[in-house]
Image (cartoon, rainbow, N blue to C red):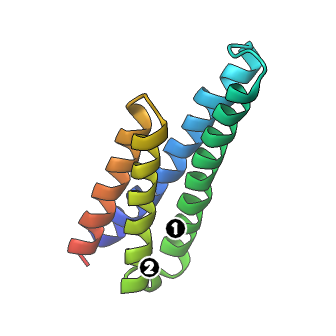
Amino acid sequence: MHKYLLYSAYGWLALSGALHFVVDVASQYFRGKREPGLETTLYYGLNTAFSLGQVAFGLFGVLLAWRARGLLSATPVQILSIAAALGWLAITFMFMEYWEPKLNAGIFLALVVAAIITR
């Protein structure tokens, strides 16, 4: 069960981060939904850094779950995963007004906690 929770937690993070980038950055840019300016630059920068950070962390977690699952069961890596999830939640509550990124980071946090409990 622990193995499947690890795959689902980090896979969910990579998938939701990629979808966040496609919906909130790429599609809005190509459709021209935002007027050029400082606020638009900040919006795209925040969402790009947020989503691609999730994708990178998620893909690295999936790679570790595939190659070195024992490493993901180590306490420092688990603390780092929880800290990352709490950091993403803090960013969503402070800077993002819509609920979808909050839900995605919350699901990742719940899956990581479940993986820790089943280790």
Q: Amino acid at mark 2?
A: Val
Placement of the C terminus among the 4 image quadrants: bottom left
Residue situated in front as seen by the camera: 76 or 69: 76
Relative horizontal placement of residue 56, taking residue 77 as reference (left or right): right
| Mark 2 surroundings: few (<14), some (14-19) or many (≥20) residues within 10 A | few
| Residue at (77, 23) in percent of width and height | 37
Relative horizontal placement of residue 115, taking residue 19 as reference (left or right): left
Q: Which mark is residue 61?
A: 1
Q: Position of residue 62 (x, y in %)?
A: 52, 65
Query: Judging from the image, what secondary structure is the residue with disc 1 in?
Result: helix
Q: Position of residue 40 (x, y in %)?
A: 70, 26
| Residue at (73, 32) in percent of width and height | 41
Q: Amino acid at mark 1?
A: Gly
Question: Spatial distance from mark 1 to mark 2, Cα to Cα?
Answer: 10 Å
Q: Which residue is mark 2?
A: 77
Q: Residue furthest front?
A: 38
Residue 12 in sight from this viewpoint: no
| Residue 9: quadrant of the picture | bottom left
Query: Judging from the image, what secondary structure is the residue with disc 2 in?
Result: helix
| Residue at (52, 67) in percent of width and height | 61
For marks 1 and 2, the one nearer the N-term is: 1
Residue 81 in sight from this viewpoint: yes
| Residue 6: quadrant of the picture | bottom left
Q: Are marks 1 and 2 in contact (CB under 8 Å)?
A: no
